[in-house]
Image: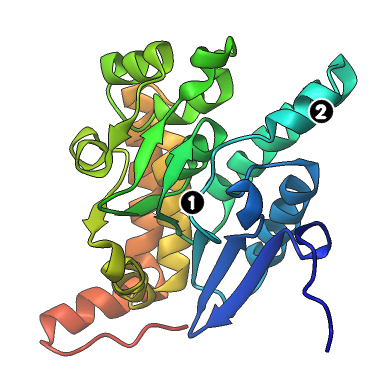
Amino acid sequence: MNAPLDDSVKPPVLRMDEEGIATLTLNRPAQFNAIDSALLGALQTALDAVAGDLAVRVVVIAGAGRAFCPGHDLKEMLANSNEAFIGDLFRRCCDAMLTIQRLPQPVIAKVHGIATAAGCQLVAACDLAVAAADARFATSGINFGLFCATPGVAVSRNVSRKRAFEMLMTGDFIDAPTALSWGLVNRVAAPGALDAETLALARTLLKQPRQVIAAGKKLFYDQLEQPIADAYAAAACAITRNMLGPDGQEGVGAFVEKRKPHWQD
């Protein structure tokens, strides 16, 4: 009989593909999926792989065990307290968050347990999020003398300014219903229904044309960072290309003809 694998030799990120949905599961359950260097590298590799995979239409990011993610592995950080290591770690983390935004596929965070610090950042960096009703969220670094600067970038782009400031300055937890009302998550499900609710959202996205989803996601994030006049100009160009493209022509034609559209992909 083989001995069970130690967590240190298990893949830090698991990938499962089914029906066009790639689920990437953070896999350090004994550490509540704290982000160490190995997990961060594996997550970046997995994200890069799905980016060019035409079979993948939706990505789900989940956590193994009892929690989604408590943020960075503080023990690893403390053991490597030098500028080269810490600076590289946070740079790589920022790169992973930006990769999520730049993926052509929509990305859904499936959240249970806690999502704190960089774990809360990961939820905010995803395009959509579904949380179990008993999930909790915090940018708790301030409680350890470490202001959650990089999580604040993503969180402040999800919730209002004063609510983001409160989260960052107090480190207090908010529950799932509060996260829903503040805009950090899209849906809240009973713990036993989290998988089903996430799958339902993913399947809704699967019905939409791939190229329109990809172009729409890019435009969505680009225009958020632009002055309003520039945002409207970019949006006008994008919707013109969309309307004159094959999916726009098919979708509008199907509506006029009262039939179901047949997307090119």
Residue for point 66% across, 68% down: 14
Residue picked out by circle 1: 67
Mark 1, Cα crowd under 10 Å, few <14 / some 14-19 / many 20+, is many
Q: In this view, does 259 lie above or below 212?
A: below
Q: Is residue 54 visible?
A: no
Amino acid carrying mark 1 in the image = Ala
Please state which of residues 77 and 226 is positioned toward the viewer in this rendering. 77
Amino acid carrying mark 2 in the image = Asp
Q: Quadrant of residue 221?
A: top left
Residue for point 21% across, 80% down: 253
Q: Earlier in the sequence, mark 1 or mark 2?
A: 1
Across and down, in percent, residue 49 comes to 71, 65
Q: Describe the element under mark 2 as helix, strand or loop.
A: helix
Q: Describe the element under mark 1 as helix, strand or loop.
A: loop
**193 relative to 48 in the view: left or right:** left
Q: Is residue 75 visible?
A: yes
Distance from Cα at disc 1 to Cα at disc 2: 26 Å
Residue picked out by circle 2: 88
Looking at the rendered image, the quarter that the N terminus falls into is: bottom right
Mark 2, Cα crowd under 10 Å, few <14 / some 14-19 / many 20+, is few
Across and down, in percent, residue 58 comes to 47, 68
